[in-house]
Structure formats: structure tokens, C-alpha cells
Amino acid sequence: MGPAGPVKVSARVIWALRVDLLVMVTVAAVMAPIPDSLQDENATAVLSVLGICATIFIGFRNSNAYSRWWEARTLWGGVIINDRALDNDLVSLDDGSPAMAPVLDRLRRRQVRHAWQLAAELRGVRPPAGVTDLTPEDPAEISATELLTRQAHDVQLLARDGHIDSQSRMMLMSLNTAVVTAQSGLERIRNQPIPVHYDGFIRLLAWVFAIVAFNRLDAASHHPGSIAIGLVIMAVFITAERLGHFIEEPMSNRIFDLPLYRFCATITGNLLGPDHPLAQPREDAKATVWM
């Protein structure tokens, strides 16, 4: 918030890394008193090889992690776009008849509920208060997939009653299908993480390199400056590896998540108006973290 924003974000990252940083300091404290005669003479060669391997593997893994984060962000952008397009199409198809009005209203409310329900399912939590009340016509425990199926039934109802023609029906179902596609992509990202054995290998490699690097810097002398530089190098590599782990799971209900509820609030404002309670951001515009 304000000039202190970067400091607050750094504090949250450090808190998320607290266990790793504590272990790092403990390892350094154990290694620092080791006599120089016990340092491995071949550590310099090992350090060079490990440095290359660690850089390649951590860079490759973090690149894939960012790709997952970016894809999730793009798919949520698609959900917002298609929901806005749905609202525009419903406006264009509205003939002003009393029979059509409740169906269009239900389509809008259910589409908003779908966004909130999807965000909750991806995070593995219950939907926020007020989401279930959006569509009292639907069961309280209905899933996001079932909500889209009920949307398709209402489009069928509009076509059956002669309120829309076949072209309009196809247009509405195309938007429904696009949201289904985006939802499936988001579920794939959420349910198919990086393989645990590969994740463990990268983490182990980062730790081994960090320890060997500290070992060589401390071998020259036990000067506090060498120890401090060694700690910095350890922190850089370990933090780089952990940040890659955090961003590869962009919908895990942590502070590193995409701001899913901000997306849902935007969709609510687009379909139900900016004054709707669920259209209000859950955090202040200057908040350090948006969830």
C-alpha cells in the first residue's frame, strides 16, 4: 500500500519461505566452523558443473511454471470476455416480452454464479457468502459444470417458445461452449501439477548447489563477508526455485494466486450492475494482495 507496498510484498514472500530460510541459516551455521582442511578440494569443479545444471533446470522449470500461470490468466480473461459477450447478446435478443424477461434474468444471474462457483472449486473452498443466493432456482450444492448445463436448457427453452431463432440459439451456445472450454483448461491446470518427483529433483539440485557454493566461499576464509556472500547466493537460488513452485499453482488459495475473486467481481458488475454486493472488490484498490 503506497510506498511501503514492495516492502509488504517482500515480507509476505519471506514469510512463505520462512522454513527454507531457517534451514538455510542452520546449514550455514553448521558449515561455517568447519576447518579449511576438511573442505573438499574438488568442490570448485563440482560447483561449476552444479551451477550449470542448477541454472538450466531451475530456468526450465520456472519457464514452464510461468507458462502455466500465464495460461490460467489467459483462460480467465476468456471467461470474462465470453460473459460480457453473453450479456450483449441477451440485450440484443430481448424482445421486451414478460415471458422472456425472467429467463434472461436467470441466465445472467446463473452466469455470474458460475464464475464464483468455478473460482471456489478451483481453490477447493466453499463459495463466498451470497453466491448461492444468486440463483435460488438451482440447488445449493450444484457444480460449475451443472450450472452451464442448466444455461443450455434455458437457451433450449427460449428456442422452443419461439423467442429466439436457430441462429441466435447457435450464437448463445457458442458462448456457452467457449466458457466450458475455458473451464476445462483451468481444471486441467489445477488438477495436473508438475510431477512431484521432478519438483523434488529441482529442489534438491538447488539446495546442493547452494550448499556447495557456500562451502567454497567459506573455504577461502572464515571472514564474515564471505559468509554473508555465501548466504546471499544460497538465498537467491533457493528463492528462485521456490518462487517457481509458487507460481506453477496459480489457483491454490494462497497469496500467490491469480486474483480470482477480482475476476468474479468484474463479471458480476458486467452482468448484474456495478452496485451489486458481489460486484464490490473484496479488497481495497491499494491492497498488497488481491485474492
Image (cartoon, rainbow, N blue to C red):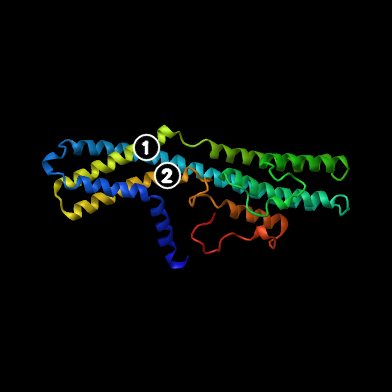
Residue sitting at x 58%, y 43%:
122
Q: Residue furthest bottom?
A: 3
Total numbered labels placed on residues in the image? 2
Q: Which mark is residue 202?
A: 1
Q: Residue furthest left?
A: 37
Residue sitting at x 55%, y 53%:
259
What amino acid is found at the position of numbered circle 2 in the picture?
A: Gly
Residue sitting at x 73%, y 44%:
139
Question: CB of mark 1 within 8 Å of CB of mark 2?
Answer: yes
Position of the C terminus by quadrant: bottom right
Mark closer to the chain start, 1 or 2: 1
Residue sitting at x 67%, y 41%:
143
Q: Which mark is residue 244?
A: 2
Image position, residue 228 (x, y; %): 23, 53
- Quadrant of the rendered image containing residue 146: top right
Instruction: State the SS at label 2.
Output: helix
Q: Nearer the viewer, residue 30 or 246?
A: 30
Q: Which mark is residue 231?
A: none
- Asked if one can make out residue 233 in the rendered structure from this viewpoint, the answer is no
